[in-house]
Image (spheres, rainbow, N blue to C red):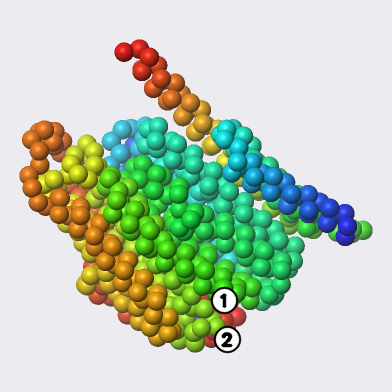
Amino acid sequence: MTQDLIYSVCGIALFGIGLYGLIIVPHILQKILAVNIMGVGVFMLLVAAGHNPGGVSDPVPHAMVLTGIVVAVAGTALALSLVCRIGELQRDGADEEAAP
Amino acid sequence: MNGLQLQTLLPWLVALPLLAAVATVLLQRLWLCRWLSVALSAAQLALALTVLLLLPEQSDSAARRYALGGWGAPLGIDLYIDGFAALLLATTAAVGFLLSIYSGAYFNEADKAARFWPLWWLLMVALNGIFLAADAFNIYVTLEILGLSAVALVALQGSLPALQAALRYLLVGLLGSLCYLLGVALLYRAYGTLDLAQLALQAQAEPLSWAALGLITVGLLLKTALLPLHFWLPPAHSSAPAPVSAALSGLVVKASFYLLARFWLETLDTAATAGGLQMLGALGAAAVLLGSLQAIRARRLKLLVAYSTVAQLGYLFLLFPLAAPLAAGPGIAGAALDAVAYFIIAHACAKAAMFLAAGNIQRAAGHDDIERLQGIARRLPLSLLAFGVAGASLIGLPPSGGFIAKWLLLDTAIDSGQWWWAAVAIGGGLLAAVYVFRVLNLAFAGSSSTADALRMRRLRLPKTLSVSAFALALMTVLLGFNALWVLDLLDIGAPLSYLAGETP
């Protein structure tokens, strides 16, 4: 009981840290990392929920975490590609301004 | 017709758009993609209408449930349909059909069109999946498919503001889904199940379920863009391509509202507190007023329409105080749901028509600066007519779907003894009249400046664009005449079934 309680509290703490980062930190890459930290927090809570001391642990939360990781990878990839494209456009815009 | 048929149709509502998404990736020829998509969205519409027609024969809730792969509820993932879900599915299919026709003519650059169709079909997969979901984790997955495809569709525009709006939309969407997932994790920890019907039976009013409901609500409110959390919607919806804006404002935000209604009034109704229900209503009322004021002040036409969405979403949240089990009897709660469901359908058609009309104006004029749209009605009579008819529905003028919806809402508010919500609905209608007529006044009065007129003469708008915008506007008028048929359907296994003593 205490073991998975520790993991649950850690998971919620990670979620909180990520949320704080997402709102406070100005840099966009750090914001994307913060979202990932939030995700890890939720996954930790889920894994803790499946923990069964002395018995076979519940597989359903593990399946959920696996799905969640796939979704998180897809979301992060989309966010990073958007950031790259925005960076390119901003550089182009700056170049045009510099060269009349 | 037997019960088996309805059940076996349900998975096709998800499978058909998914197959279409794969097909449009694989097919290299654009014209083929375009015609295949129009044909498949017609098939989807036929499928959704068949489901709608079969539904009245299925009063037994087991006949409206489909176990994917035969696994059944605790472990497997079920699909479940009732009147509310079926109506939203049909609305999605109908609006989606007209938007597909419009999009076929709208995207004239080959690379944009090639990227559009697979994303468009994924959006349809996610919407249908959400409306049919009977499993809390499956909802998370469909929400993410919805969010990711919607973000990619906004980014399709390719301009810097569109990409920045898309990135913000993505971060907000991810934050919303993670809050939702944390809520679901707490629910699983407490009750050991993800099936919505089983959760409804087991959930109790205790701290853990309150926390879960709170997290789920915050996550879904972010996605529905209720007032304090609406900041991402106007830039994202106003910078997307026209058919995408129409789908986002008309359909996508309704999906998360639908889930909110399910969680508050059905799945976790034991954990819902009267204060929470009233607070949702108050935020909705604030959204109606502030969203309308922002729309009046907007300088760009598409931004005006996007702020109008913020305002119209506010009306939907009046469902919660009006259907509050403490304040109302069963009859009133049912009437509140009728009114709000009608509102969703009428707004979906009207707002889609409005965004398409705004897109036509933007394409013909080369800009969407409201002050410079003088006399544009002479160039685009059909598009402006569509804008006007859709606007009439948003204001709530008869005969339109918006009028019936607002009438039902006023009626329910007064019946439940909460007249102040009726005042909000009337005030919102007046404010809507201000921003709709502000555009129409300029468009119909005065002559267009010569420079703009010259530009426009060279640009010919394809007929399909104005006709499909007008067809959507016509649908809002038709909704004004067929209210009873729609309302009867809603009563089948309504989400408020706890009031009738039926277990969902």
Where residue B460 appears, x then y in whole percent?
A: 15, 38
* Residue name at image x 42 percent, y 42 percent: B153
C-alpha separation, residue under disc 2 versus residue under disc 1: 20 Å
Name the side, left or right, on which B324 lies relative to B370: right
**Residue A66 sits above or below residue B92 on the image:** above
Where residue B173 appears, x then y in whole percent?
A: 53, 48
* Residue name at image x 38 percent, y 14 percent: A98
* Residue name at image x 45 percent, y 86 percent: B331
Q: Is residue B431 visible?
A: yes
Mark 2 or mark 1, which has the lower sequence index?
Answer: 1
Badge 2 element: loop
| Amino acid beneath label 1 | Ala
Q: Residue B51's quadrant in the figure? A: bottom left
Which residue, given by chain and number where applicable, does mark 1 sit on?
B274
**Residue A36 sits above or below residue B275 on the image:** above
Residue extending furthest toward the right: A54
B147 or B102, nearer to the observer: B147
For label 2, the crowd category at 10 Å Cα-Cα, with few meaning under 14, some 14 to 19 and many 20 or more, is few
Q: Which label belongs to residue B501?
A: 2
Name the side, left or right, on which B45 lies relative to B25: left
